[in-house]
Amino acid sequence: MSACIVGWAHTPFGKLPDEDVESLITQVSRQALASAEIEGAEVDEVVLGTFNEGFSPQGFPASLILQSDDALRFKPAVRVENACATGSAAIHHGLRAIESGAARIVLVVGVEKMTALPGEEIAKTLLKAAYLKEEGEIRGGFAGVFARICDLYYQQFGAQPEALARIAAKNHANGVHNPLAQIRKDLGYEFCRSLSDKNPVVVGNLKRTDCSLVSDGAAALVLADEKTARQMERAVRFRATSQVSDFLPMSKRDIVRFEGCTRAWHQALQKAGVTLDDLSFVETHDCFTIAELIEYEAMGLTAPGQGYRALKEGWVYPGGKLPVNLSGGLKSKGHPVGATGVSMHVLSAMQLTGTAPAEVQVKNPKLAGIYNMGGAAVASYVSILEPLS
């Protein structure tokens, strides 16, 4: 039984001092139900995705979704977590409930409140998604983890600072048109390429423009079985999904190859009966610019070490053969960890229903590809979405 997205909601991402986890959850829950024109009483199950790990003092958050509608009381509610892929993990939990026949309608919410902590605590909290026995002392927290990956990539394939700057500039230019994005400013290639007081080194070869943003925010989806979805005003169908998990220690993997990402893409495309060339656009997990570069290669857009070609040839820009991160990506939009995977699905659903901002709306999109990553390519989730015809 196929599942579909029939409603959604998305807060702006950024520093939201007047919001907490509860207010963010209740806001998007109400808006998503209204978007789907569904009453809380019709929901069979609720799923919350949040990484937390110290970001919020509120533990046991799953039942906070019930605060949004009294009719959700006594519905099964669960919290799931899988590092930066937490949002997609929550979606997969909901999909399984529908595909098994256990539920007809599922409300999925992803949320994170990150900015209440001081910077050092944020870095320490995020580093918990690494293998602490070997990687816990890496300077710079999770940015340091990806700086190490960047160093190893440069050693193997040659330095690619121009490619990283082009990724940052592309995503910031796209983010200008996303009213939900944390930074809506076209920074330009030269700014992203150059060291300056406003673009200093964070760690290693990564500058500030190479790193995604610390953010607060939430996003929500209403999922329904296909029979129900066909009665709705709009619906986006999951044509295929996949999840792959790899070793947590980077020492057990060729870390510049993102093999889990490759396998997840291969499985999803094979299930969907399509190729990468059939996709209209992709939302991919650019937690750091080096991640997006390697993901071009891992998804099969280019050969290993040649991700720069996707930029040089213009393939991943608006109007290119496979636009990537038309939303602005994590780089511009922001990265509230538990909300990110849900956000990617919301913004892709908007593209597929023709409701994205006009400046980045793909003409007659047929298929969307989404890649959401937890840790350093440890948890890999791919979705292939299409409008329900």
Image: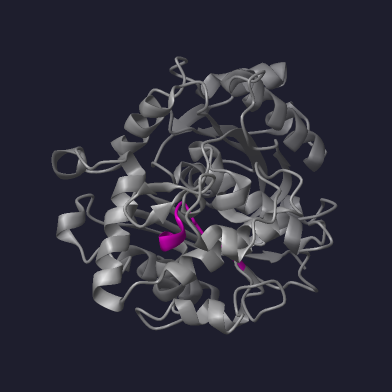
Query: In terms of depth relative to the viewer, which is nearer, 129 or 289?
Result: 289
Q: Is residue 220 visible?
A: yes
Is residue 265 placed above or below 283 in the rendered structure?
Answer: below
Tell me where residue 334 sits by quadrant.
Answer: top right
Magenta stretch contains residue 98: no
Residue 265 rendering spot, x and y as whole percentages: 44, 70
Is residue 192 placed above or below 313 in the rendered structure?
Answer: above
Query: In terms of depth relative to the viewer, which is nearer, 183 or 328?
Result: 183
Quadrant showing the C terminus: bottom right
Quadrant showing the N terminus: bottom right
Instruction: Residue at 48% x, 29% y: name it.
Output: 78
Residue 139 rendering spot, x and y as whole percentages: 25, 41
Residue 123 rendering spot, x and y as whole percentages: 36, 33
Instruction: Residue at 37% x, 25% y: name it.
Output: 121
**What is the magenta range?**
282-291
Instruction: Residue at 58% x, 84% y: name it.
Output: 313
Query: In terms of depth relative to the viewer, which is nearer, 273 or 186?
Result: 186
Query: In terms of depth relative to the viewer, which is nearer, 191 or 28?
Result: 191
Magenta stretch contains residue 283: yes
